[in-house]
Image (cartoon, rainbow, N blue to C red):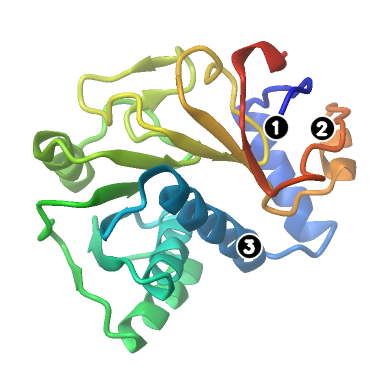
């Protein structure tokens, strides 16, 4: 799909998230549901996996991964969830309770040695080298040599510089949400864009005038030349 698609800064994205909830009444669970559903669809489109290991952070990115786990399970994929911490934020914790009711495997370490890894550890607020349990999971994932798909931003990718840290998932296909973040273009080779329900009027309030992007599909691959 060829069109001009702008990048968005982290500060602008934070304001978009705030406006969505506070001014437009579009809730975080709604956006999270859209993100996870599209992530599951893209995972199957790109890899058609029999198994999937979902690496989950405590925040909203992790919540999207938990939604994706449910959709992958519904589509017949043998799905396990690996938590970086048991202390999730409120909205992701509710998504986790659904998976527990479905009796999906939930642990703190990877059990599968085949299939695909879904990286839902850290989103656009990540800073610096992944450390602690998250760093351990990234290293274990890289050592497994399994294919990886990332939600919004690959864990270990620095949005300020456009570089990958020494501990990171190395250039995985990435489904970014709403708009590509600054410094992604040209630095993430396989970049996809997902419609999580953000109206163009919200973007206009942060200074971005957008074309209609999702008329034909709720996700599409970004070509480098289409970004500005």
Distance, label 1 to label 3, CA atoms, is 17 Å
Q: Which quadrant would residue 84 be assigned to in this image?
A: bottom left
User: Which residue is label 1 attached to?
Assistant: 12
- Mark number for residue 206? 2
Q: 130 or 48: which is nearer to us?
A: 48
Distance, label 3 to label 2, CA atoms, is 19 Å
Judge whether 185 appears above or below 34 on screen. Answer: above
Mark 3: few/some/many CA within 10 Å (<14, 14-19, 20+) = some
Residue at 12%, 58% (x, y): give it. Answer: 112
**Callout 2 secondary element:** loop
- Mark number for residue 28? 3
Q: Earlier in the sequence, mark 1 or mark 2?
A: 1
Judge whether 112 appears above or below 128 on screen. Answer: below
Q: Is residue 8 left or right of residue 221?
A: right
Residue 37 % position (x, y): 54, 61
Q: Is residue 144 left or right of residue 224?
A: left
Check whether the beta carbons of the residues at disc 1 and disc 3 lie within 8 A of each other.
no
Q: Which quadrant would residue 141 be assigned to in this image?
A: top left
Judge whether 112 appears above or below 130 on screen. Answer: below
């Amino acid at each position: 799909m060829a069109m001009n698609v702008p990048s968005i800064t982290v500060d602008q994205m934070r304001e978009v998230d705030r406006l969505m909830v506070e001014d437009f009444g579009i809730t975080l669970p709604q956006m999270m549901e859209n993100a996870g559903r599209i992530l599951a669809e893209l995972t199957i489109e790109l890899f058609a996996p029999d198994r999937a290991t979902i690496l989950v952070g405590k925040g909203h990115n992790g919540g999207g991964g938990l939604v994706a786990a449910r959709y992958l399970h519904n589509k017949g994929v043998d799905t396990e969830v690996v938590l970086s911490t048991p202390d999730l934020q409120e909205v992701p914790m509710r998504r986790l309770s659904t998976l527990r009711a479905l009796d999906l495997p939930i642990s703190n370490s990877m059990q599968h040695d085949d299939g695909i890894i879904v990286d839902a550890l850290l989103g656009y607020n990540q800073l610096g080298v992944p450390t602690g349990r998250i760093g351990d999971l990234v290293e274990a994932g890289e050592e497994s040599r399994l294919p990886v798909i990332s939600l919004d931003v690959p864990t270990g990718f620095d949005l300020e510089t456009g570089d990958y840290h020494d501990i990171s998932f190395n250039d995985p296909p990435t489904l970014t949400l709403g708009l590509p973040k600054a410094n992604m273009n040209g630095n993430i080779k396989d970049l996809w864009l997902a419609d999580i329900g953000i109206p163009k009027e919200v973007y206009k309030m942060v200074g971005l005038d957008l074309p209609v992007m999702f008329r034909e599909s709720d996700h599409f691959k970004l070509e480098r030349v289409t970004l500005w």
